[in-house]
Amino acid sequence: MNCDEARQLLDPYADGELDVIRSAEVDRHLTDCPACSRQLTGLRDLKSGFGSLYYHAPRALEGRITAALAVEASGRADAGLSTPSTTSRRFSWGLIATAACLLLALIVSWFAINGAKGRVDSGALMAQVIDSHVRSLMASHLEDVPSTDQHTVKPWFNGKLDFSPNVRDLASNGFPLVGGRLDYLEGHPAAALVYQHRQHYINLFEWPSSGPIGPDESQSSASVRGYNVIHWKRQGMNYWAVSDLNSEELSDFARGLND
């Protein structure tokens, strides 16, 4: 089971809705995949948070509504007007109130789930990016194709990816290209381009955005576990730059790529 398949099953897995076989498959995948495990934790936190949104109406409220209906019914009877039965009125009001509450709950839940899902997904993807950067340094596997020549690195990806990565040499900006390798992020093969600034390495990950090509997104940045990360979208491509460089120097690197 790969990450793409596992993420489609995390919701029913968290609710205990999977059969024994599928649940065991997800268990095995989660054991070896920290990124999916973090996403499951975020999903469970989100589900538990919704429990606090449920509101129980006070018991006295039903009594006040029933009493008000009885007073109205009595007034209509005194005036000689036809009066629906109290049971019928209580049923109608209860049905309307229930429908209104359900509609409100659906609206609130839709916005909460979609907003929170975006945050969870973005955080999980950032964790994947940082983990990939750290693994490349720990395993001494920075490059599959070590080269400072962009015309050597770019053609190396031909036939290995379903897209052509944007490869630029930024030596004149102080960020020379040192090579590239294959990686896998967000359930998609990605190009990892490696740059250097003094003794610091920068991993630049590129892969196509899922779905229709949307508008470009300006840079957003974060600092996690001592690593600085910058993310942006341009012409239908995802770009993630990560390094232990300080945020100002990593921003200079990103600007150089987009000039």
Image: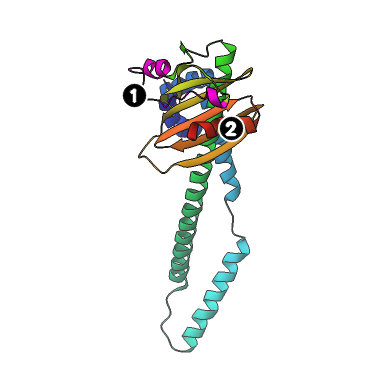
Q: Given the image, on which type of amino acid does mark 1 rest?
A: Asp
Residue 162 lies left or right of residue 38; in this view the side is left
Residue 48 position by quadrant? top right
Q: Is residue 39 among what the camera can see?
A: no
How many neighbours does mark 1 have within 10 angstroms: few (below 14), some (14-19), or many (20 or more)?
few
Res 47 label: none
Label 2 or label 1, whichever lies nearer to me, is 2
Colouring convention used in this rendered image of the protein = rainbow
Q: Nearer the viewer, residue 149 or 135?
A: 149
Q: Position of residue 216 (x, y in %)?
A: 44, 41
Examine the structure image and report whether residue 241 is included in the region drawn in magenta.
Answer: no
Above or below residue 102? Residue 206 is above
Q: Which residue is mark 2?
A: 252
| In the foreground, 65 or 82 | 65
Residue 205 at x, y percent in the picture? 48, 25
Helix, strand or loop for disc 2: helix
Q: Which mark is residue 162?
A: 1
Nearer the N terminus, badge 2 or badge 1?
Answer: 1
Residue at the (60%, 65%) spot, across then down:
61
Residue range in magenta is 151-173
